[in-house]
Each structure stands twice: as structure tokens, then as C-alpha cells.
Amino acid sequence: MTLLDAEPRTLLSAITEIALIETGSRSAREHWQQIQLRNLVKHVTERSAFWRSRIGSRKASDVDLAALPILTRQDLRTQVVSEGPLLRSADGFTTKAHSTSGSSGVPVQFFVSDFNGNYNGIRSCAQFFMDGLDLSLNRTRIRTTNSPVRGGIDTHKDKTWIGSLATLFKPGISKWIEHFTLTKGDTRKLIRELEQDDIGYLVCAPRIIDAIGTSVDLRFLKTAKTAMWIPLSEHVNPKLTEKFASLSIPVRANYSSEEVGMIGNECSKFSGHYHVTSSNVIIEVVDRRFEIEGLKLGKVLVTHLHSYATPFIRYDLGDFALLSDKCPCGHDGPTIYNLQGRESRLVKHRDGRLTPFVILSKDLTPLVNFTEYRMRQTAFGRIVVEFGGRSELQPEEIAAVSAFLKERTGPEFDFEIKSCPEIDWGKSLKRPGFRCEI
């Protein structure tokens, strides 16, 4: 007996399988992961001289993941340049070149298959099922483009954001709002656009919320019927989390990377704890010697179980965290916590310490008028601050900004404060407020 059309039946089946892997029996999950790892290792040893040299004489069935060498970004570049994609047309998958945003330095080039894109879409939808969320609410996605947008912002809508499942469930609309930069005028246009429809699930980078908060009180988001904020791409300042809590708007971040997709989803009960996306990755945390805010954190290594085009096995993401076998909420699966993000987002001190450096636009707007800003640590004890939309800065503005930042960092740092009509972000769609370049 067939009750469903083929397309929604296939999608619903895939969502069910993901949920079973990630929330079901630990022993079944770990067995499944070992089979996937064995298949991946067998594939790379057959197709890649680079990987054969790393794995050695070990059989795919005998590989101990922890015994393999760590894959650095330079290692990755070497493999990609020398061998290209490890999937062939005869394998039945289409591959294409992809890269990281470059927000943390030089972009990393690699290859992905059409399977990776399909999985990422299904996995994103699966989270709403696993969290028991209402599919009839709208989803509003705000994103940055890499070229100017006529009129400041551009909007388009789709009838649904749940694809073929809209034949089974009442769907909310999918609304996309795109922008290049957010001047005060553009921010006002964005706010007016957000007022046109119920927001529902708001998906955007924290700096978008930061920009909105400089123009209106964030209570506006509650009035506009925001059911949840799903932040992307950047660290969420605890002050923003507290503000959303005061508005009774849940914040549900995810932990992902351009290279491997979804890595973890934030626990609904314990903020800052991320349930590892076990249907996609195996996570290790090694070398716990990095002191960040008084904690000894380790490097996050990711093994992407579906990385057949460009393999990611024990890949060093450049992030720091701790790892537990289970979450305090009772979730019986690996959980990442005390996640500090990329090393490039941390201030480096001469004594070896690493500290987060998160400044919000609303912290700076009382001191100086600007359209956008960027801070870069270029040397020990030196941070360059750029303010966009300004041809020059007044001495009193420079003094006020410098005094404010020294309060945050201490006397160790000097600040070079510059004006520029427009900040050169390159091709990166991510525009972090701070980046360490040493």
C-alpha cells in the first residue's frame, strides 16, 4: 500500500533515518559510524596516493582513527592540488569545486559532491522534526551578498521552506532578504521588510541582529512574531543571548563549517552545549593545552563521513572546545561545549593566552558614526580598527574609541584607528568584526 508520493516519501524516510542515527541506540550509532569510516578509508586508499602514504599498510577494517595523522589546511591544499576530486563520473555523483569564505585567512579550496548538498538540505530540515518544531511557521533568512544590491536590500519569497513535505504538512513561507552592506538607511529598509510578514524562524548572522539593535529596540522582533533565532557564521555575544531570553525568543545556534557542513546543534535545554551531528561527522578534541578564559581547551578534529570527493579525516578546523560523551540534558551522544571558535577570532597575547574579543556595533555607535567596522590584530599588542563610511575621523572620536577598547583589552594593546569610505572585504560573505592575523 502506497500512501505517499515518491519524492516526499523519500525525504521523510531520510529524515527518519537521520533521527534514528542521532537520537537512537548509542551502540547502533557507533557501529554505523565505524562502517561509514571503514568505507571512506577503503575509498581513499584505492584512489589517493596522498592518503595511502598517511594510512600506511593498515587495512580499512583495522584503522584506528586516533592513530592517523591530523589533517592540516596545508595538507588539504596539497591533496586537492595534486589529485583533484577522488570521485569519478562513473561513480554516479557530480562533483564541483568549492571553498571556504576566507574570513579566517586564505580560502581553502576543495571538492564536494551533489550528495553533500542533498544531505545538508535534508539534515537542516530534520532538525525541526527532532526538536518538535512547528513547520507551519515562516522561515526568514537574511544573508549578505558579495556584490551591491540595488536599492540596498532585495527580497523574494517561496511558498514553502520544507520542499516536497509541503504536500504532507501545512507549510510556512520561505522569505529571503539579501543585502550587501547595512547602512542606517538599509537597516531601516530591512526593518520595514521584516514587518511585512510574520518572521517565524529567523536565520541570520549575529551582526544583523546587532545592526537592527542600533536602530530599534529588539522588542520589535517579538512584535514581528519571531518564534526562534537561528544564528549563523559568527559567535553569539552572551549579551544578545540574554536579551533574547528576556524576550522569550529561543536562540538555537548550530556549529558547522563550509568544509563539512553540520557538526552540531545547540541543546534546547543547555545553552552552549552542541549535540554532535553523528549522521555526518565523528568529532575528537585533542591537545588540551590552550588556555582560554581560564579553561584548558583542546583542538577540534572532524572526520566527515561523506567526504568522498575531498576527504576530511581528522581535519583540524582551527576551533577550540571540550567534548563530553553525553549532554547534561540526557541526550546519549557526544556533545561539544565551551566552544570558542576559530583561533583567528581570538586575541593572542605575548604570554600565550587566547581571549575572545567580541565588540557589538551598539558599543561603538555612541562613540563614532560609521556604516561598518572591522578590527584586525596584526601583531602582538597591536589592533587595527577600520570604520567604513567615513573619509576622516575627528580626534575626539579616535580618543574615545581607543579608550573604550583599552578598557576591554588592557594596557598591552595599542590601536590604530582608521577611516575608509568602504571596507575591502574581498570575496568573503562573512564579515567578522574581529580577526587575528598572526
Image: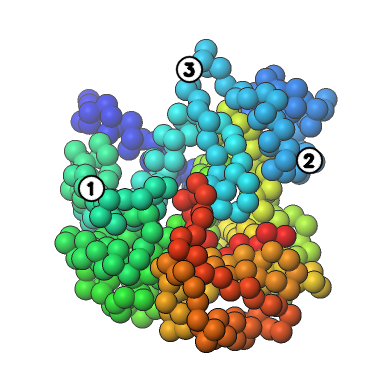
**Pointer 1: what residue?**
156
Closer to the camera, 407 or 231? 407
Q: Amino acid at mark 3?
A: Gly
Q: Earlier in the sequence, mark 1 or mark 3?
A: 3
Which residue reaches farthest top? 90
Q: Which mark, residue 69?
A: 2
Q: Amino acid at mark 2?
A: Pro
Closer to the camera, 251 or 215? 215
Front label number (2 vs 1): 1
* Figure quadrant of residue 7: top left
Q: Gap in Å between the C-alphas at discs 2 and 1?
A: 46 Å
Q: Which mark, residue 92?
A: 3
Closer to the camera, 37 or 209? 209
Identify which residue is drawn at 46% across, 51% down: 429
Identify which residue is drawn at 48% across, 34% down: 116
- Element type where label 1 sits in the image: strand
- Location of the C terminus (image quadrant): bottom right
Residue 4 in view here: yes
Expressed as whole percent of the image width and height from the top left, the position of residue 369 reads 42, 77
Is 144 situated left or right of 87 in this image? left
Q: Earlier in the sequence, mark 2 or mark 1?
A: 2
Q: Amino acid at mark 1?
A: His
Identify which residue is drawn at 63% across, 46% down: 106
* Figure quadrant of residue 214: bottom left
Q: Earlier in the sequence, mark 2 or mark 3?
A: 2
- Location of the N terminus (image quadrant): top left
Q: Gap in Å between the C-alphas at discs 2 and 3?
A: 30 Å
Label 3 crowd bin: few (<14), some (14–19), many (20+), radius 10 Å: few
